[in-house]
Amino acid sequence: MGFGRVGKTFLQIVHEKIEFCQKRYGLDLKLHSICEIDGALFSSEALDLSQVFREFSSLSLLRGSPYWKTGLHLQDLLNSIEPGVLVECTPSNIKSGEPGLSHLRQALDSGWHVVTANKGPLVVDFRGLREKAKEGGVALKISGATAAALPTLDVALYSLAGTEIYRIEGILNGTTNYILTRMREGMDYKQALEEAQSKGIAEPDPSLDVEGWDTASKILLITNTVMDTDLTLKDVKVEGITAVPIHLLDEGREEDKTLKLLGEFSREEDFKLEVSPKLIDRSHPLFGVDGANKGITFTTDTMHSVTVTGGKSDPRGAGAALLKDIINIYWR
Amino acid sequence: MGFGRVGKTFLQIVHEKIEFCQKRYGLDLKLHSICEIDGALFSSEALDLSQVFREFSSLSLLRGSPYWKTGLHLQDLLNSIEPGVLVECTPSNIKSGEPGLSHLRQALDSGWHVVTANKGPLVVDFRGLREKAKEGGVALKISGATAAALPTLDVALYSLAGTEIYRIEGILNGTTNYILTRMREGMDYKQALEEAQSKGIAEPDPSLDVEGWDTASKILLITNTVMDTDLTLKDVKVEGITAVPIHLLDEGREEDKTLKLLGEFSREEDFKLEVSPKLIDRSHPLFGVDGANKGITFTTDTMHSVTVTGGKSDPRGAGAALLKDIINIYWR
């Protein structure tokens, strides 16, 4: 679903890696459809990915293809072939969750696995979607919506299996981390934001990032998955970086600390779920995570703390995270 | 197998987490036997872990228990109950692989899964063991032998699924990292080693660590697993930290670099598999991994580089890694 930047890059990666996936994982990947708002490219036999990239590289070319069915509904499509994986890449709306929420519900109800890069549906109805997946015995994989190429949920669920996680701290948004890094180096907020926009790191409307809602959505989804909770955005205390007090930046420089927009969950003393700019010191494992990079620290009972940093912060990283989730549904 | 520090700590953690594992993973963990060189505690019904810790906390008490069978062979034990998981915790011998190698072969041949904290058998015959596991359709899980609580293989195989890994760099040995950290702060090698020994970080005979063989074993096992190769210790170029040139330390301080014993695999240009002290600069993701901490960086095609740091470096961390592997065999 969705032939925008992420959807297109995802298909590009699949195209590059078809043989690798066959050889390494015994997975025979087939593309049956590319769905857009007004119709879908569809073949019950499987589309030829080389042809897709040779001939239909833009949406308008897609619509001119002989495989294009104007007005084809997702439900008809889901009913017409064997269940597989629906890959959701439409734009994220964290208020209504639509149109992704309807896509995910239909797919899960029809016995399809879901892999999503779209946070919206998960932020709006994580509980309902998780239950649908459970009832249908299908997978709902959300790496693409929770920091993409930075492994977060995999590590918590798989690498830390058997531990109790007490605290999660994450630098989960590249745009705000880039801005704060540049501010530490002396820029003011406005300069740093403009530079980030000119480099394509920040979006023209950066409000979801700089006001903390992107980080809030990610820490919420990570917490709900790891702790098996049903929290919503209303449970997250959110403060962005649009009005960072100057004294925090000065204090950071003086005391060899660094200011980071942290998404935090904790149940160590009181329950805490919040997003705010925080000074962290040199001994903190996320101290060196600068620029548009991301990182996450899990604090556990038996394994102490484990930190993951890195992972490409761009559509290619997001596309690779979608492919990873698909492989992990089928490969054992 | 093995009721030493790691084996005992592993059972302690299982004991603490029996209910948690039932509730969280639906796993009903049962202990049938604790095997030692001269016999085994054994019950076909399952041993009572509370009783084990109340009454048989030492090996001599174990041997006085009514469940103790002197001279019971592993093979008899494997044949007498339904196949489960053999957890190998006997001392590591990277030359002969024994006694662990025989344990692992017998277990895999008898249709048992294997989880091992013992590097020896894997270093000596990884290929043979992997083939036995494959033929028998059972798991051979080796987190406990490859940096334990620091997730290494999980991340490479699961979180980076679908990527091609071009380079692996790891600080994989806490003892040598502790010594180098103290040397950077001004101590000489002898002082730093003695301090590490007095703190229980270095063993009385530290040669496997300081000469680089522990790191070599780990980077070898990680490479063989991730790249699906059959390399042996002979293929690893190994240099330890017993004779680090003073000029490297001085250079590090002057140029704001830090000296680390790195285990490295690379296939970017020429093939490389080596262990040596290397200066890394501040922008390297492993720069801040100091003291007895460990870390690993994977460089991939589609997700760029991903780094994991942390994880408890002690028997409790190792025990937790063994439990993690068991959970991941059964839980999906």
Image (tube, coloured by chain):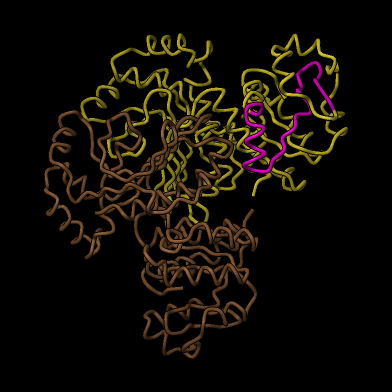
Chain colours: A brown, B yellow
Q: Position of residue A256 (x, y in %)?
A: 20, 30
Dividing the picture into quadrants, the one containing residue B51 is: top right
Asked whether residue A253 appears in the rendered view, the answer is yes
Report the side of A183 relative to B117 (left or right).
left
Q: Position of residue B34 (x, y in %)?
A: 75, 23
* Residue range (magenta): B14-43
Report the side of A191 relative to B322 (left or right).
left
Report the side of B283 relative to A17 (left or right).
left
The residue depicted at 70 percent of the width and 31 percent of the height is B87
Report the side of B13 relative to B199 (left or right).
right
The residue depicted at 36 percent of the width and 85 percent of the height is A60
The residue depicted at 84 percent of the width and 18 percent of the height is B67
Dividing the picture into quadrants, the one containing residue A184 is: top left
Is A136 above or below relative to B202? below
Q: Position of residue A227 (x, y in %)?
A: 51, 44
The residue depicted at 23 percent of the width and 36 percent of the height is A258
Residue situated in front as seen by the camera: A56 or A330: A330
Is A293 above or below relative to A300? below
Asked whether residue A297 appears in the rendered view, the answer is no
Residue situated in front as seen by the camera: A296 or B72: A296
Is A102 above or below relative to B190? below
Question: Is-magenta flag for residue B32?
Answer: yes
